[in-house]
Image (cartoon, helix red, strand yellow):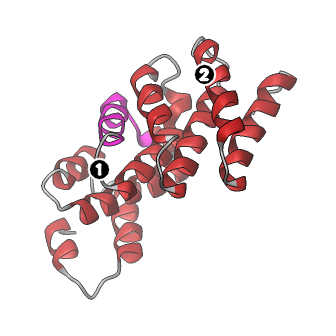
Amino acid sequence: MNLALLFKDKTIKAKAKVARVGNWILSDELGVHELLAFSETQNPSDKATCIEALEYVTRKNPAVADEGLLDFMTATLQEDEPRIKWESARVIGNIAKLFPTALSKAIDHLLINATHSGTVVRWSSAFALAEILKLKTAYNIKLLPAIESLNSKETDGGVQKKYQDALKKVRKGTKG
């Protein structure tokens, strides 16, 4: 297992790198923070691939996350590269339930990205915001009207669906 060699090998497509790195983490051959440190030294495309591997991992096993990972993903929401923004938002959506009282900064950055010109950035932000809304925390005082407003202004049906599903679950009082 050598991250540097894997990322230098241009014959391996990004999706294959995601799966390989993700499986290294899931099998404890690679630590999450080792990958985060590596990603910091990479170009935006490769950094996004590292974050996508973390999305793959946290979708399968959210428990690999700690507050350091949440803080890193929150910070990367502010980067210029759209793919970094959307992969970071997806990771936050996957792990939000583990940190129900530590999401304030993430929410602020997600709300900014929810108005991004890129549909995938908006969809991923909507996914994360919806997951946070469904936690039914004190954040909902601010988040519920913000999501209602975003939903009413959103032009993409897929993004709207993310918001509407979460709003429906919160309004019905069901867990979700």
Q: How many marks are shown on the rendered structure?
A: 2
* Residue for badge 2: 143
From this viewpoint, is residue 66 visible?
A: yes
Residue 39 percent location from the top left of the image: 21, 54
In the depicted view, which residue is nearer to us: 168 or 101?
168
The three-letter amino acid code for the residue at tag 2 is Leu
Name the image quarter holding the C terminus: top right
Res 71 quadrant in image: top left
- Which residue is pictured at 48% across the width and 56% down the height? 118
Name the image quarter holding the N terminus: bottom left
Q: Residue furthest bottom?
A: 11
- Work out whether 139 lies above or below 175: above
Q: Please state if 99 lies on the left or on the right of 2 as rendered.
A: right
Q: For residue 71: magenta? A: yes
- Which residue is pictured at 63% across the width and 35% down the height? 150
* Residue for badge 1: 80
Look at the magenta stretch and give its main secondary structure.
helix
Disc 1 crowd, CA 10 A, few/some/many (<14, 14-19, 20+): few
Residue 3 percent location from the top left of the image: 19, 66
Q: For residue 36: magenta? A: no
- Work out whether 97 lies above or below 88: above
Q: Please state if 176 lies on the left or on the right of 18 as rendered.
A: right
Q: How far apart are labels 1 and 2 at the CA level?
A: 24 Å
Q: Please state if 91 lies on the left or on the right of 38 as rendered.
A: right
Disc 2 crowd, CA 10 A, few/some/many (<14, 14-19, 20+): many
- Which residue is pictured at 71% across the width and 36% down the height? 152
Residue 40 percent location from the top left of the image: 17, 50
Identify the element where label 2 is drawn: helix
Q: Which residues are magenta?
A: 64-77
